[in-house]
């Protein structure tokens, strides 16, 4: 599931970031350095918008994932509605800010820097035509994680692919045919955002959709508490926003609008690097939250280990590709302007070199959010967001202008990763001791395996029976739990897969406080046993048919079914 989540998310994020890169290339190549400088002024504003966007995206990844892990489907549906409503209300505020008060917004972005009137006017035009896109921009971050959690993971990248195609075509038509300048570039982006939202909303036309929004407008403390989980990530984006303004000011002081344009081009290329870290950290947060909802501590740590592996190997290889391609990429942005090309190439190399460190920071931030250490995550995210970056940029007084920008980034990220490593090593043994004490207090026994054959299912069911007996569960409940494990696993292996597919069922059994919780997970055909039991077995009175499901329905106390990342997940409670 982790690798599939990373794969889907990477291509989705890459396509989104490709919009930024393509906009940067077209602006720099066809509209000139002044337009590129105006685009550089606008780039920090995306971080300001992301202050709300990441809040709306983090709550589905953390809270809805945890709700599904607990089997609270109706609570998850209410959260989806509240998030969409919150996003719509926030979008109206942004639309007002970027239309009526756009002059104030641009003045804030170019504070302390004397940009030309032409640059400021182009930035204002871009803001005005970008304003209507705030509605889909605020709603799609909620819907993308929901698509993965609701068993329609392929729709998320599909929506992004279609929207990106529309945006690129719109940019080309704007430059070649309509000559709309910065306003045309923003208008193409706005249209593509609405196309993306439409494709995502078509998900709810499916009969199999489970996470349909359930109207709930009452403001509850639990809703405010849920939103508070995204505050650390909001602080990160606020830091990025302020640092973006500070870096633009620093660049303007060092080399005028040329270096501002080079930084904007470097940020556009860095946007193509970020999908790697965003996809991995998103998978850690989403699947880690589900594992935590299932009280699977090993699963949460496993998500962190896989995330760090991705950061150290695939992300490093990905960064090397961009380091090698720095000069051709810089030429795309600035054509034959050697001075701008050299500055941009240096910034691209520096960003690419620091990218694995950025990925490690983001993965650890996600892990800290999952385990509830949100304020520690906030400290890490603010530092990773650029405080260390700007400090070291100012300290590197002897370096060339472009070198001060990327060297400050690199040294800041390295210092942060080193500090995080020291803290993790210091706290590692203490956390393990706390988990052991917690498990002893809860008197919890956990068993987990993957079965491929009927024989393996039978062996594991016997292990469940013995563990339940050793845990003080009655012999009757222990035997029924083992029978439930064997029946559900064997039914899935027999009927849940096509002949060409490798059959495998992940089973996890938790014995805690006199209750037995069994989780089954497979990637076979979509099948909701809870719905089948309620609709078919009630009317089918023939006891010779569906013996396995009849046995399970008589044994269980509670059943929850979910489809996450195209995997069937069944939770059975036996008391």
Image (cartoon, rainbow, N blue to C red):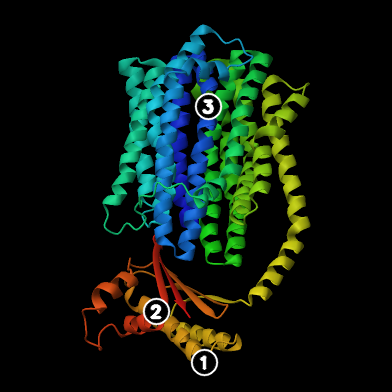
Residue 182: name its quadrant.
top left
Residue lying farthest bottom? Answer: 475
Q: x, y (%) of residue 342?
A: 61, 21
What SS does tag 1 mark?
A: helix
Residue 438 visible: yes
Dot 1 or dot 2: first in sequence order is 1
How many marks do you count on the picture? 3
Query: Mark 3 — residue?
Result: 45
Q: x, y (%) of residue 363?
A: 60, 49
Q: CA distance from mark 2 to mark 3?
A: 52 Å
Which mark, residue 488? Answer: 2
- Residue at (32%, 76%) from the top-left corner? 495
Q: Viewer-proximal residue, 307 or 128?
A: 128
Q: Viewer-proximal residue, 415 or 464?
A: 464
Q: CA distance from mark 1 to mark 2?
A: 20 Å
Query: Mark 1 — residue?
Result: 475
Q: Few, some or many C-alpha atoms within 10 Å of disc 3 (few <14, some 14-19, many ≥20)? A: many
Disc 2 and disc 3 in contact, CB within 8 angstroms: no
- Residue at (39%, 79%) from the top-left corner? 488
- Residue at (58%, 21%) from the top-left corner? 262
Q: Residue 80 vs residue 329: left or right?
A: left
What SS does tag 2 mark?
A: helix
Q: x, y (%) of residue 289?
A: 53, 58
Disc 1 and disc 2 in contact, CB within 8 angstroms: no
Dot 3 or dot 1: first in sequence order is 3
Q: Does 223 sit above or below residue 187? A: below
């Amino acid at each position: 599931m982790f690798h599939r989540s990373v794969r889907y998310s990477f291509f989705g994020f890459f396509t989104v970031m490709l919009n930024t890169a393509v906009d940067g290339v077209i602006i720099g190549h066809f509209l000139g350095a002044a337009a590129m400088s105006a685009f550089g002024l606008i780039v920090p504003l995306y971080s300001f918008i992301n202050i709300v966007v990441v809040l709306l995206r983090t709550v589905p990844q953390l809270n809805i994932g945890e709700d599904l892990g607990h089997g609270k489907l109706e609570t998850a549906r209410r959260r989806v509605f509240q998030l969409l409503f919150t996003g719509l209300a926030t979008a109206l505020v942004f639309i007002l800010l970027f239309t009526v008060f756009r002059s104030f917004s641009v003045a804030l972005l170019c504070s302390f820097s004397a940009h030309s009137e032409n640059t400021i006017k182009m930035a204002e035009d871009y803001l005005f035509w970008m304003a209507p896109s705030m509605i889909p921009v605020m709603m799609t971050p909620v819907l993308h994680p929901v698509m993965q959690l609701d068993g329609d993971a392929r729709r998320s990248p599909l929506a992004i692919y279609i929207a990106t195609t529309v945006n690129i075509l719109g940019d080309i038509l704007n430059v070649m045919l309509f000559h709309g300048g910065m306003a045309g570039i923003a208008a193409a982006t706005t249209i593509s955002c609405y196309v993306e939202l439409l494709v995502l909303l078509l998900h709810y036309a499916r009969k199999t959709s489970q996470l349909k929004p359930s109207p709930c407008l009452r403001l509850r403390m639990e809703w405010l508490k849920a939103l508070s989980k995204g505050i650390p990530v909001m602080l990160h984006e606020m830091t990025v926003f302020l640092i973006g303004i500070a870096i633009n000011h620093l660049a303007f002081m060092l080399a005028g609008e040329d270096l501002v344009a080079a930084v904007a081009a470097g940020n556009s290329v860095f946007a193509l690097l970020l999908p790697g870290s965003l996809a991995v950290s998103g998978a850690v947060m989403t699947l880690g939250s589900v594992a935590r909802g299932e009280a699977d501590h090993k699963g949460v740590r496993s998500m962190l280990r896989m995330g760090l592996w991705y950061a150290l190997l695939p992300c490093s290889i990905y960064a090397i590709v961009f380091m090698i391609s720095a000069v051709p990429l810089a030429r795309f942005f600035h054509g034959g302007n050697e001075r701008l090309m050299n500055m941009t190439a240096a910034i691209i190399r520096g960003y690419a070199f620091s990218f694995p460190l950025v990925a490690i920071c983001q993965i650890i931030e996600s892990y800290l959010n999952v385990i509830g250490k949100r304020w520690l995550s906030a400290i890490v995210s603010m530092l990773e967001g650029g405080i260390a970056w700007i400090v070291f940029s100012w300290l590197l007084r002897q370096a060339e202008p472009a070198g001060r920008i990327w060297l400050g980034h690199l040294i800041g990220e390295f210092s942060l990763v080193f500090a995080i490593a020291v803290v993790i090593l210091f706290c590692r043994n203490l956390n393990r001791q706390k988990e052991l004490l917690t498990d002893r207090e809860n008197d919890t026994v956990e068993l987990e395996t993957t079965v491929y054959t009927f024989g393996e299912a039978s062996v594991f069911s016997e292990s469940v029976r013995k563990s339940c007996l050793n845990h003080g569960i009655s012999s009757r409940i222990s035997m029924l739990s083992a029978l439930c494990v064997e029946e559900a696993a064997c039914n899935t292996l027999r009927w849940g897969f096509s002949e060409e597919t490798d059959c495998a069922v992940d089973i996890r059994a938790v014995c805690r406080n006199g209750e037995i919780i069994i989780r089954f997970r497979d990637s076979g055909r979509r099948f909701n046993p809870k719905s089948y039991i309620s609709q078919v077995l009630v009317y089918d009175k023939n006891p010779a048919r569906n013996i396995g499901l009849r046995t399970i329905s008589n044994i269980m106390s509670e059943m929850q079914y979910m489809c996450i990342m195209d995997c069937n997940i069944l939770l059975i409670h036996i008391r």
